[in-house]
Amino acid sequence: MADSQLIHDTLPVEVLQDIFALTSSIETQRNGRLLFRNRFCPLNFGRICKAWRAIAWSTPSLWSALEISAAGDSDKNLETKIPLVQEWLDRAKTCPLSISLSSPSHLSDKCDVLVRTLVACSKTWIYMDLCLPFGWSFNIRNIMASSEMPLLQTLFIEGHASSHAFSGAKALSKVVIAGQGYHSFCPLQRFPLAFLGSGSLTYGEFRNALVMVPRLRVFEGTIFGSARDEENTSLQPHHLSELSIRQGRPQTADFVALLHSIRLPSLSTLRLSQTDSAMDLGLTTDSFLGGVLNRWKCQLTTLMLGPMTLPEEGLIHALNALPTLRHLTLIDLRKCLRGSTEARWLDLAHLLYTSSTFLPSLDTLRLGEFDYPSNFPPRMTIFFERIKAFRTVENFPLRSSDLPFKIVLLQRYSEKWW
């Protein structure tokens, strides 16, 4: 107690508030989803001593993130949580709120009370992460439809939710819909979206999304099916700069047809994954790499490929035509090579430490192997130091002058591919 007394007697309250805020800050994943790991920090501060409790209880920003995990809760447990949620919201006052809600699988009056408790402060919502079991969509819509959400910018949805429930979110710029919930959230044009993510879209729905959200800058999603004749007309979304698409299972999405049917004058980042059946669809290296990647050869700065079936020599040929590429990620291309998989990446490695014209702007190389680290790393690792020593700014003046060349060997379970 003497040490803590010395701290809060010596430091101004404002400094302690800043320290508390840093300690309770929330981590963010690459796609912007928050990880509410430190959500109990304000309560933990209050357990130290009276002085710390007084500071924590009177600092609204410490209460600006709230996770409510109610999945599997009985009505009795919900009834216990509701006043605690209300007290937490009262302490947050008018701070912009980030909320994560995992709803019970059943509908009841207590569930409605919980949602209404949150909706009462909807004017301060800035981030919302909802996990809604099937059957909740209509209930949520009825409660939230007339609510004002002037600050809400980011919405993550697992399950089904109606876009009408968020009609008051006039500033909503980012929506990510997991699983099969895309259909229930349409139409999208009511929102000024810049970022759209979806767990499952047909080819036609993807094109419709580009039409409905003309100012979309980032799209991430899994696409099923192939183009129909009426969908072969060209689209030109002027603002889309980042496109990340996975091929759905069963793998039927024809990426060549899809990418040829849209013109992307602002595209700088392209990620394509789960295309193991590229050869089964009769796609040649030239049609897939030459016909697709070459369309953006003077503007792509970030490229991720894999897992997919492509010969390494074709991949190298395509990469050789991308002078502006700064960040390259290759995931599990083991099926690309004939013969032993131990030779994987070796031709690419040789070019990276011998050729001054191959990928002249490259700053970062990321390699992912599905069997690493449970198995041995690829043999290419023995050339990592040689590559980094060769790829200096002196040898490659188009590189970023303030960054050393970086190679990352991704581990299956510790890094997200995208």
Image (cartoon, helix red, strand yellow):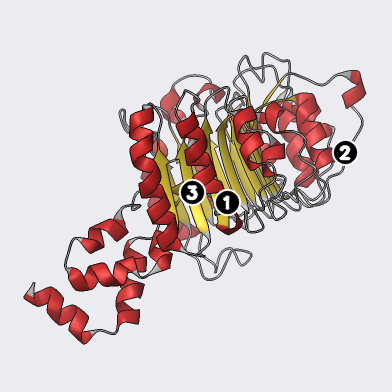
Question: What residue is disc 3 on?
Answer: 99
Q: Earlier in the sequence, mark 3 or mark 2?
A: 3
Q: Residues within 10 Å of mark 3 (few under 14, many from 20)?
A: many
> Residue 54 location, x and y as percent?
27, 71
Q: Residues within 10 Å of mark 1 (few under 14, many from 20)?
A: some
Element on which disc 1 rests: strand
- Position of 211 with respect to 255 (left or right) is right
Identify which residue is drawn at 68% across, 33% down: 162
Q: Nearer the viewer, mark 3 or mark 1?
A: 3
Question: What residue is disc 1 on?
Answer: 327
> Residue 386 location, x and y as percent?
42, 53
Q: Mark 3 belongs to which amino acid?
A: Ile
Mark on residue 305? none
| Residue 42 visible somewhere in the drawing | yes
In this orientation, which residue lies closer to the viewer: 7 or 300?
Answer: 7
| Residue 353 visible somewhere in the drawing | no
Question: What residue is disc 2 on?
Answer: 235
In this orientation, which residue lies closer to the viewer: 378 or 115?
Answer: 115
Cα separation between marks 3 and 1: 33 Å
Cα separation between marks 3 and 2: 36 Å
Element on which disc 2 rests: loop
In this orientation, which residue lies closer to the viewer: 20 or 226?
Answer: 20
Element on which disc 3 rests: strand
Exactly how many numbered labels are in the figure?
3
